[in-house]
Amino acid sequence: VRVNTSMYDAQQGATSGAHIDISTGAGNNNLHGNFYSYRATNAFNAAPFFFKQDPNIPTSQKVPELHRWTAGGALGGPLVKDKLFGYAAYQQLHVSDQEVGISRLAVPIGLSDDRSAGTLAALGNATNGGTDNGVLLTAGSLSPVALKLMQYKLPNGRFLIPSDNGTNITNPNSSVQDNAVIPGTAYFFSKQAVADLDWNASKKDILSAKYYYQHDPSANPFSYSYVDGFKQHVDAGSQVVSINNAVALAPSLDWTQTFGFVREKAYSTNDQPFPPSSIGINTFGFDTFPGINIGNILGNASPFSKSLNIGPSATKYSFTGVFQNRWQGASNAIWIKGRHNVTFGGSYAYTQLNVRNQRTDKGSITVGTFSDLLAGTPLTST
């Protein structure tokens, strides 16, 4: 393997960035194979530093669960003795990780499981002294949308917006700036396969074909949203096909022809626990929940200014992705003349890039404070 970061010659491309050369050996008449497996868990792990210091994380969750499993195998050998050789390998990886799947967030100080209109109104008044224009909230003045949002429970029985767990975050010298924790698990999967064929057409002609496949789906419950129910799914992968023919035209003249194809993709989507219309949000015919951002969720009760995101908004990179195809052909010859090596040839590349952007039908709502959310008063701009 050789990595050329700069000053490489024309046959290795004309774009910036590193160029990687990989030389692989051809097959032989011996049959070889292997199998391997690796398993890792959190059984012997110590508590991560920030988990151990955070009083919001229960003792039972100080050592987050981690399961990592890798397994694979390979087999290579002759298909036709002295002429045709094959090789195939496969590997898969499974990771489930609670350390990166947890959400530490700030909710209104004093928010409890009592989500009645009167209790929420009193909490909004205590948090911000009423709305931005100084009007005190009452049970009858709350926005029905905000009330449904605060009272909504997920299928697992938890509130969409969790309650305050009682952690003191009113001390400006405190290192703890959250008063709620939502456990979750992030998942990553990877499947990789490779297949090679080497054909000795003659003593002067060798033909090789290679194929590579990779698929890496992942899921994160709190990628863009601080609350549960809006899990992000990323579908990524690639495929590579390469065909190479090397011919010795003369003792001092070699000729190679190469064709390559690369297919790459990366696309992101999000779950949503309910359509916006079910709680009274008008999204003008679209069924995607608009991300809601509360700028200062703690209000005057805390020296910290913390925001709260409910779902992904149109400004995030959810529901977007790229799909790229690239075809490339090249033909090169190397002529050795005395003390000189002369290389000449040509190459052609065609790239097709498709971008899927579905953020145009996604909305976003921003409110200044918790009281403004309860009053149904979003921020506006002109």
Image (cartoon, rainbow, N blue to C red):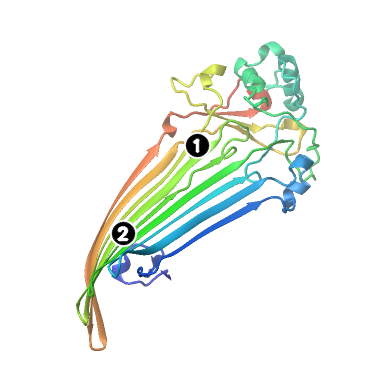
Q: Where residue 67 is drawn, which disc sits there?
A: none
Asked where in the image residue 197 lies, by quadrant, the reply is: bottom left
Image position of 97 (left or right of 111)? left
Q: Estimate the x, y position of residue 52 in percent, counting from the top left.
A: 77, 48
Which residue is located at x 54 percent, y 58 percent?
36
Q: Amino acid at mark 1?
A: Thr
* Dot placed on the residue nearer the N-terminal end, 2 or 1: 2
Name the one closer to the observer, 158 or 146: 158
Q: Is residue 328 visible?
A: yes
**Rendered location of residue 115, percent (x, y):** 72, 19
Q: Name the residue located 49 percent from the left edge and 44 percent from the top edge.
A: 217
Where is residue 333 drawn, in percent x and y?
22, 73
Asked if residue 85 is positioned above or below residue 114 in the image, the reply reads: below
Amino acid type shown at disc 2: Ser
- Give the CA distance from mark 2 to mark 1: 39 Å
Q: Secondary structure at mark 1?
A: loop
Residue occupied by mark 1: 315
Left or right, residue 358 beside residue 218:
left
* Residue depicted at x 68% and y 37%: 183
Label 1 neighbourhood size at 10 Å, few (<14), some (14-19), many (20+)?
few
In the rendered image, the quadrant that contains the N terminus is: bottom left
Res 132 visible: no
Q: Is residue 131 above or below residue 193?
A: above
Quadrant assignment, res 208: bottom left
Taking the image as shown, residue 28 lies to the left or right of residue 106, namely left
Residue at horizontal 45 percent and vertical 59 percent from the top = 74
Tally of numbered discs? 2
The residue tagged with tag 2: helix, strand or loop? strand
> Comparing marks 2 and 1, which lies closer to the viewer?
2
Name the residue tied to disc 2: 242
